[in-house]
Amino acid sequence: MQIQQHYHVAAGSYYVSRFQPLILQSFLGTCVGVALFDEEAQVGGLIHLLLPEPVSLAGSIQPEKYASTGFPLFLEAICNEGASKSRLKAFIAGGALVGPLEDMDLHLDIGGRTVETVLQYLKAENIKVEKSETGGFFTCSLNLNMQNGQCRIEPAPIDMDSTAGEIHLSSAGEIEQAMETIQPIPQVALKILRLIDNEEYEIKALAEEIRQDQVISARTLKLCNSVAFASSNKVESLDQALVFLGLRLLVKLVISVSVNEFFSHSGLGYSLCKGGLYHHAVGTAVIAEKLADYTGSVEPGLAYTAGLLHDIGKVVLDQSITSAYPLFYRKLFEEENNFSEAEKEILGIDHTQVGSKLARKWSFPESLIDIIRHHHEPEQAARHLELAHVVYLADLLMSRFHSGLELERLNTEALASRMETIGLSINKFADIVDLIPVGVFESSPEMAMLQR
């Protein structure tokens, strides 16, 4: 008996094959997933689309991101495998709204316009839509069985094991104890954070700080020599890494390696998959850096670091959320509570409060403490208003366009004014979505660091 494997089709990509024991799967928020299958030829596939059409020259480089350019490629690939358009059945899911829409906010209905573009192609090719579940505000998964062509559209997955048993609500004392016992971020990373905050990129001092932590040095070099950074020459020292990568990228690698170890303490409380919190953190960091470059509002290195660390409070509260998972999930999705409100109702505190406490305890720079505390309500940031808005927007983009990592719902009612704070009009929303490197959707999000 063959065991069925699962293959995750990341945003901005598609997968096509003949009959095999495989389930194709995409987690969808604002993105749109389309599955096609020809039962007679036993050929099918799934495409995961971000936008209806290209909004920049990048569309010619990554055509699979867009319905208007990616879907024709996807359909051609399926037909090249032996499928017939006349026998194909289509299944469509995703396209959740970015937030509550006013009559003029059609540019926020990116998912709806992506669905419309796909439907136009399907109609032109006389391909029957077997099932379509799109719109709303919630995430879902699209699953295509490559053995029989059956397709399921389901709500975002819940770790059912974590919902079993008696609910335990952590006390304030237990949360304080978790904060005391959690392993801190390495000192070398803290020193680098302060250098970045002061914009002091002194090469010799930086390299010397990294060398003093042999574990971090070894992990950084391992990542430099990974597939993501493959080259003909092996990187054997930090000096070589500095020449090969450049100072800015080396700094990001060191901090990311350090934070990865910190996030490894988390389980499946907030996260829908193993490593989900770290993946979300790196993706948010990469997008924040892109937004900083695009708007010129804040220093990109600081934006990356703030994006990477914005959710550190979740690591402290992760076990508490795991213990109260059914209640948390119900308040978040069935009662439609604000994310922070749901945390406060259950635990008496939210992850932004815990994270800022932890950051202050570890002597983080004030800029990072401010952003960790206010990334859900950036207008409340005391002295780093633009940085807080950049991280908020990056966090929103990562959660809406890369679902399936963690439970998070950001308030979008003030989205237009929040974008204006960093010099963006709401009609530029599709443009900033187009800034997202597809590498952040891959299983190794560090790959996105190299995408310019």
Image (cartoon, rainbow, N blue to C red):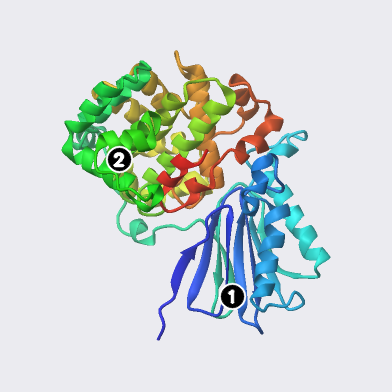
The residue under the point 40% across, 20% down is 370
Is residue 46 visible from the viewing direction of this image? yes
Q: Is residue 299 left or right of residue 369?
A: right
Q: Is residue 126 rendered to the left or right of residue 139? A: right
Q: Amino acid at mark 2?
A: Val
Mark 1 crowd level (few <14, some 14–19, many ≥20, 10 Å Cα):
few
Residue 7 is tagged as none
- Farthest residue, direction top: 383
The residue lying toward the viewer, choosing from 166 and 234, is 234
Label 2 secondary element: helix
Q: Position of residue 232 (x, y in %)?
A: 37, 51
As drawn, the label of residue 257 is 2
Q: Residue at x 77, y 64 (%)?
A: 122
Judge from the rendering whether residue 438 lies leftward or rightward of residue 218; answer left or right. right
Residue 150 is tagged as 1
Indicate the amino acid at tag 1: Gln
The answer to whether 303 appears left or right of 349 in the picture is: right
The answer to whether residue 311 shows anywhere in this view is no
Tag 1 secondary structure: loop
Is the C-beta separation of discs 2 and 1 under 8 Å? Answer: no
**Residue 73 appears at what percent x and percent y?**
68, 61
At 52% from the left edge and 19% from the top edge, which residue is drawn?
386
Q: Nearer the viewer, mark 2 or mark 1?
A: 2
Which is nearer the N-term, disc 2 or disc 1?
A: 1
